[in-house]
Every structure is written in structure tokens, then in C-alpha cells.
Image (cartoon, rainbow, N blue to C red):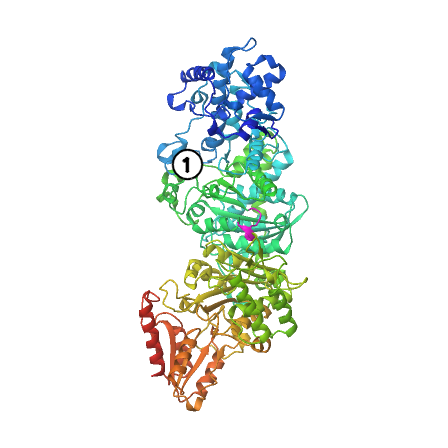
Amino acid sequence: MMRRLVPARGFAWCMSAGITAAAFKAPATPAAATALMVGRRHAADVVPERQLLYDNDSFLTGSSAMYIDDLYHQWKKNPKSVDESWAQLFSRSDLGEYEHGLLDAPIRVLPTESSDPMEVKQSLADCGRLTWMIQAFEDRGHLKAQTDPLNYDETDITQRTPSRRYRELVRLDLPYFGFSEKDADRVVRVGFQDQVGGVWDTSSAPMTIKQLHTLLTKRYCGKIGFELVHLVDAEAKRFIRNQIEVEDETSSLHRVLNKEEKRRIWDIVASAVFFEDYFKRKHSTQKRFGCDGAETMIVGLRALLERSSKFGVETINLGMAHRGRLNVLCHIIGKPFEVILKEFIGVTGQELHPFQIQSDVKYHLGCRAQLELFSGKVLQTEMLCNPSHLEAVNPFVQGYTRAMQVARGEEGWQKVLPIEIHGDAAFSGQGVAFETMCISEVGEQNTGGTVHVVCNNQIGFTTDPKSSRSSAYCTDLGRVYGCPILHVNGDCPEEVVRVFEFAAEYRAKFHKSVVIDLVCYRRFGHNENDDPSITQPLMYERIRSMPDVFSKYSEVLIADGSVTAKEVTQKAIDEKARYGSFQDAAAQVNYADYLKKSIPPLWKNMKYSDEMGKVTLQPTKITQDTVDKVVTALKTYPPDFQVHPKLKTVLDRRNETIEAGTGIDWGTAEALAFGSLLLEGHQVRVTGEDVERGTFAHRHAVVHDQKKERTYVPLQHISDGQGKMIINNSPLSEYGMLGYAAGYSLYDPNTLVIWEAQYGDFANGGTIVFDQFLSAGESKWNQQQSCVVTLPHGYDGKGAEHSSGRLERFLQMSNEDVATPAYSREERAHRVNWEITYPSTPAQYFHLLRRHVKRDFRNCLVVFFSKQYLRAPNVSTLSELMEGEFQPVIPDPTVPARQARRLVLCSGQLYHTLNKYRETKGVKDVALVRIEELSPFPVAEVQQLLAEYSSAELTWAQEEPKNMGAWNHVEPRIDEYTKGQRQLRYVGRAISAAPSTGYKSKHDREQELICEKCFS
């Protein structure tokens, strides 16, 4: 039996490609075993027993591979110089084939006429030790790297950081690997595999063992530490090894900086340092969460932008917390310094009044600007607004970036670069960092790689690293997602530049994320008025004695002749004067005008709060032609596409109801809403767990072929000029995915972006997004929120975690006052911070979605919907979709006001339960009125309703317990409208800690009691 080999540069690699290591026990013959053991005994003279090579190593693996390749090259030069058994193997492999079992034949490592037995023994011993040494530097060199600018030595201080504890256990000296002093000058050749890269490459020149050790120490234990062993991508590993180990002045990590580049770095360092110095001197009592101690982050980011622009990046989106944010805003994003200074001096309420917003602290605000690079190119830059909740902005950066990339087409990932700046404690401690890294690497959410920069202050407020994580580094999260991790000394600007340039190159080449651990320190406390020496006395004793990075780097440049001492002195004077000169300009800043100019281009046609009362109501009806086009797409599949028989029945019935004009259920109405918007050119994006089919099997937007591994989305094929339809199941994440969807919606208001919870109960996993962004984003940052959130809600006896989307919490955060006047529908929606709805029919849901996109302003729209009534009997007619509009209140036409003894107000699915009970019992004098929109509250409609039913008893009915649901939102409003003259009676479940029971029988009895009380 013959087997063909894949051509290989290294013989050992070639053999191992065809045979697994488990197939052989190395070496293959007693003679070879004797020779190997002699070599091992030689090594044992120096190396402790625990460090010996394993006896069951395959002779094709690291311990023997280099030796075998040496034999192969020796044979190529002189076939008689090796043993006959090796010659036979080499000969057959050169013909591209070998017999199965050939390698099981006796293979002897014996001296021949031209081979020295001692050289054989020495070569075998060296193979194992050199492999071990090279891999040890690659695996653990970062632990010995000089990346900490604080340069701790004392044991009591080193125990603060987990990596320091590991550092003490690592040995990388020559004796550790079994080499004595007499071995150090022996020449070896380690290059044997081009596929591995670095010193393993066949182009590597022979060198002494000492030279190799010196090279590895310089590369892996300098001011930069590298972690790459965890990478799965072999090509990426090879690229990184070459960057690290091969001396190449064109590579990011080894290129020599010229005098001009050094002076440019020096200029940036000076700008960053004296930016902080200015506010420390002039506004010392205000919090700024300065960049002091981490100023080289500005240098690194600038280098990242310069290099990324050469790879096609045109836009960067940046998210970060408060530490160093103002400095980054000024020097990387391009926010005018006078505007930042204005925010320190103070923005008055009168200046904010046109927009009727509260605004936020200066170190939460974002900015959209342009930055001119040294190359002359202009980058579009943006820093997203964020709250104090650390890492919360991460998914927003990814979603916002992805929206931009989709808009720019297939090469969008190359043109738009996401950057996330993290704190050390937050990156290792906040779960949303993990969620976001997962999301940004998966399927359609992939943004083509993110540059993660950890501003590693080596402290979290007052908490030492040993108390905030168990891992060696704060960046170990990057290992999970296969990111190369580079640790760099934050007091070495040139090394920082090299690392950030490498990140740009790696991201451009592999479209994957990179993690940079910028090891620095925090010169002052968590904020500038805090005294950190109370909790970290030794750390801050050292920090107080350290000069700033401008002084340090100036000394380096003075020493190499790049600058003079006089220039350094003058630079400090000039920078202080430059920042001081902005005082008058800051006083002249028109902040309202600045806010107006800060509105993104795609949002210019939206009406903000400075145009209150100028919004208009847009029709949401559609034409028969639109319906026909959508139906055609819904029932058309590729010729050989096999739909599941059960699903085909469902889809056929859906199309039949549209054609008949009756019986349109929730999923059908939604498909028509999506299709109509797509035909109008809008993009529709739906994400969440199980949204393709729908948790309750009501959507079926993505159809699976039953014979082939492929899918089909009918709504993507309506017409050539339609908008993009994107619907995909998401990772099992609420916080991260909701943030991603909300971030995506910030880019273009004309895109319908929906995040749907698997169950409404699980939405509270994204509470931070609801509380800090969606409900308050416009008030804090003048940033309208466009995301639509759909939450399955309603009681059906499935337990406390499958019943409630927590309607009460959303209503509690509504900014609408009880005594709000009866504005028009659109104006009251424009004034409220978000819209909370609970539609009861498919037609209502259809018009809600279309209304959201057709308006000339945006609010976050939260839609609660029933799980029970997604199908018949809760259906609508086609005419309700084609001619109607969304009704905030649906009156009861079956019970005239004059004969009603009771008016029952309710929302959502309870209406259907009550109506069914009413029909069963034959009740004729109780009216059921649905309030479909709870915020903004339909003041005018409800006041008119109360006037019509002036003599009827008033009841509010809900499924939720009294301390939940809409009761506490509705009751005070009815009291306000009736001036306390009419009492609103409560019917619902009693006050409870849990939303519902887990027993179906108990649930049924509670529902029955609600119905009885409503009609008794």
C-alpha cells in the first residue's frame, strides 16, 4: 500500500503530517534508545530529574525533529554519511511516497564511517533542550518582561499582583535548560520549519546557544511581553513569531524610529502631560479622572490611527470609561479644547434650555469630529457617550461600528475600526466585557477585529489586583477568544508606539481582535481629590518619587541627540502658555450651538427637543401593490428548496389569510410590516435569542432546507431595490446583545432595529442598558434612541420567570408627569423619554412598527406582547393594516356608554381573557376598554372616555400583582383627571414578591377570580 506525502520543507514535519505521534514510540530501535539515553544522562548532569524529556515522545516531535532534519540535510549532501535505515527512509520520502509500516521498521541512530557518535549524542540532547528553551520563552517570557514602570522589587509589594507571584517561579536562564558554561559557545542550527516561523524558520542562521538565549531574552523579556501560545490560528502565530524573533526593520515591532518620529512622539507626550497639568493647576477641585501616569496611551492611540489609515481605515469608533477620557477626547477624537474648558467653567441651564436636557458630567460626554493625521489624511472620529457603569459602552461600540460597516458594503470592516479602552479591574471583572467579545466575533455581528486597550493602573479604586481577579493578568479574557496579548511598559513611549502599530497591522491582516495591556499607574487617587496612600501606602510612596513620562522621555532624547535641554525647558513653557490661551475662547463658546452641530449627519432631519411641537403625524397604511409584492416573496423559494412539511402548511396558511384579507395573525402582520418597510428602502434588523423562528414558533423568518445545510430568508428577496433584511439568532446574552442592538440603532434612524427577549422576564439582564441608555440617553447626551424592544409578556401559569417583562419598571422610568396636559399624539410622544406599549392585536403591532420608522423623531419603543394570543382567535383583517393607524386607546363598541354600569380599563392579553368570559356569561353592561399605549399616556383619549362613561364605575384590571403592572402608573392619572371625584377600583393579583405562581391550577383560579371581580 503506497501513500503520497504532501511536499514539506522539513522532513520531520512531512512525516508528522502523515502519521500521528501516538503511532510511534521514539526512538524506534534499541540502538537509537541507547543513543538517546546517553544524551539524556549527559543532560542529567546539569538538569534536575523533573526536567528530563519524556520517554514516550514521538521521534517526530520537538525532542527529535531538529535532529532528524539535520540527518536529512546531511543525507542530501552525502547519502553514505547516514545509517542505511535512515538513507532508505529519506530516499523513499524524496520520491513522494512511502510504504505503510515503513516507519515501524528498525531505524538506527548508529555511528557510520563519517559520523561521530558523540555528535549524535550531543545533537539529540541539544534538540530537546533547545526546543524546550524556545518554547519556554514563547510561553513564559512575558512573566519576566520589564513591563511595569513601577519596577517593584520588594516582596510585600509584589504580592499585590497575581502575575508577580508567577514571575518569581519562572526561570529562563541557561542552566535551567541544561546548558553549562562550556555549552554556551557551541554553534547550533534551530531553523527547520518555515511553517512555524521565527527562529524555527529555515532561513535562520546558525548561532551559538548563548546568542540564541540572548536573542530570546531580548525579544521576550524586554519592555514588551507577548502572549501567543493560546492562539489556534497557525498562520497568525507564525506572523507574530516573525514579528518578534526576526530582525526586520520594516516590521512594526523592530522598525527603527528616526529623529523626526521621535520628536513627534515627544510632542504628543508633552501635549498629553501638560493637558493634565493645566487642569490640575486651574481646576484642582473638579473631578477629571485624568490620564496622569498613563499619558503614553495618547501616543499609542495616535500611532494606531496613523498606521490603521494606511490599511484603509477611514473611521474609528471609540468607547472608554472616565480614566483619561478628556485627554483622549481632545487629542485623539478632536474635541475642541475650548469646549472641554467650557464644561469645566460651567454650562448654565439657560444654555441647555433650547434642548430641554439635563446633560451629564464632562467625562461621560461623547464627541463626533475629524482628526487630521500626520500623513495629511483625515479620519472621521467618534467617542460614544457612556455612563459610569464600567464596560457598559462596549456592546454599543460594536453595534454602532457594525451598522457603519454594513452601510459601507463588503469592505466595511476595513474602513471602520472599533477601539475599546478598558480599565484593568473592569476588564477582568465585568461580565459584559466577556459578552461583547463573544458577540463581536460571531456571525453577522462580527466587526472584523477590535483593538482592546487596557489602561492598566494596577489598581481598581482602592482594590489591589489580587483581590479583583484570580488570573495572572487582567487581560486573560483575551485568551478565551484567541487574541494576541501584548503587555507594554507605559513609561516607554517608543515601545508603546511599536505595540499599537503592530495591533493595527495584525487587525488588518487577520481581521481579528488584539489586546494591549498598557501597564502604567495612576498618579493620583481614583479622582484627584482622593488620597490613595491610605490604602496603598507603599505603592504611592513610589509613585510620588517618579518623574512624569515627559521628563523621562526628554532625558532619553537628550541622550541620543534628538532634542536639547533648552528645547525641553522651552517646550514646557510653550505648552503651559498654549493651554492657558484658551480661557477667552472657552467663555465665548455657544454650547447650544455646539450641541446642534454635534448631531450626526444622518440624524439632521430628525426633530430634537429644541423643535418641540413641530413634529407631524405620518400615515402608516400600505397599498395593495405593496401587499402583493411581499406575499409573492413570502411564498417563493429556490426550485430545489425543501421546506419542512409542517412549516409549509403554516406558511401556506399565512399566505392564504393575506390573500383572503382576514385571519391575519401576529407573525403575518409583522412580516407585512417588515416587507413594506424594506420596499420603502429601510433596513430591518432583528436580533435576539431564537428570533429567526421565534421563541413561540410564530415568525419563521428564516426557513431551513430539509435536505441541505442551507437557509432562505424570503424577505431578503422582495425586489432589487429593497432595503437590507438582517435577522439572526444571537448569543445567549441580554446585556450584551441589547447594547449591541441599541448601538446599531444609533447610526441611522431610518433603520428598524429590534431586539427581542426570549421571554420578557429575561430582559432584566439588560437593566443597565434600559436604565442608563435607552430611557435617559436623550436627556443626558441629546442622543435620541431608536431601538425597538419587544418583550413577550402575560400570565399563563408558566411560573415566575415566564410571565412578566416587568412592565412596572419601564413605566416607573417614564418622565411623563401625572398632570401632563392633553398634547397631540405626536407632541406627547416627542416629549416623553420612551414609549411603553402593550398592543392587543396584530394590526396594532403592525402600525406601531411602521409609525416608529415613519416619524421625524425617535424614541426607544418598548413593545410588550402576549405569548398566548399570537394566533387565532386574535387576528386582524387586511383592511385594518391597509387603512388604519395605531390607536392608543381602543374603545368598546359593543357596550354603549349610556347602558354601562362599569367601565373596565385594561391592557394587553387580559382583554381577550375578560372578553371571552363576558361572552360566556352573557354580560351586557360592562365595557372593556384597552389602553394600548401607557407612556406617553393617552390623556385626551382617556379624558374623553371618562366623560362619555360619566356614570359608570371605574375599574382597572391587570394580571400582575398590585405592586407590579401598570396600576401605580394609571391610578394617579385617573385621579388627576377626575379631580379625585371618582375612585378607580383595582382588580388583579394581590401584592407579591414573585410575579406569579408556578402551579397551573393556582394560576387558573387566580385568573377566574379576576374575571369574576370585573363582572360581579
Task: Return the residue found at the far bottom.
Answer: 898
Magenta residues: mostly which secondary structure? loop
Query: How many discs appear?
Result: 1
Which is nearer the eye, 588 or 246? Answer: 246
**Spot occupied by residue 585 in the image (x, y as percentages of width and height):** 59, 56
Q: Nearer the viewer, residue 299 or 173?
A: 173
- From this view, report whether residue 669 is shown above or below residue 112: below
Residue positioned most to the top: 113
| Tag 1: amino acid | Ser
Q: Quadrant of the C terminus?
A: bottom left
Q: Is residue 941 above or below residue 209?
A: below
Asked if residue 444 lies in the magenta stretch, the reply is yes
Residue 609 visible in the displayed image: no
Q: Quadrant of residue 43?
A: top left
Query: Dot 1: what SS?
Result: helix
Q: Where residue 147 sits: x, y (%)?
A: 48, 35
Q: Is residue 639 above or below residue 109?
A: below
**Residue 28 in view:** yes
Quadrant for the N terminus in the image = top right
Q: Which residues are magenta?
A: 442-449
State the image coordinates of residue 734 (x, y, percent, origin top left).
45, 57
Q: Quadrant of residue 990?
A: bottom left
Q: Which residue is mark 1?
A: 163
Direction from residue 167 to residue 80 in the image, left or right: right
Find residue 1005 and report its horizontal and vertical position in percent.
Answer: 32, 73
Residue in the foreground of this view, choosing between 978 and 120: 120
- Looking at this view, is 780 or 637 the one in front? 637
Q: Quadrant of residue 640?
A: bottom right
Crowd rating for badge 1 (residues with CA inside 10 Å; few <14, some 14–19, many 20+) = many
- As drawn, 84 above or below 774: above
Residue 179 in the magenta stretch? The answer is no
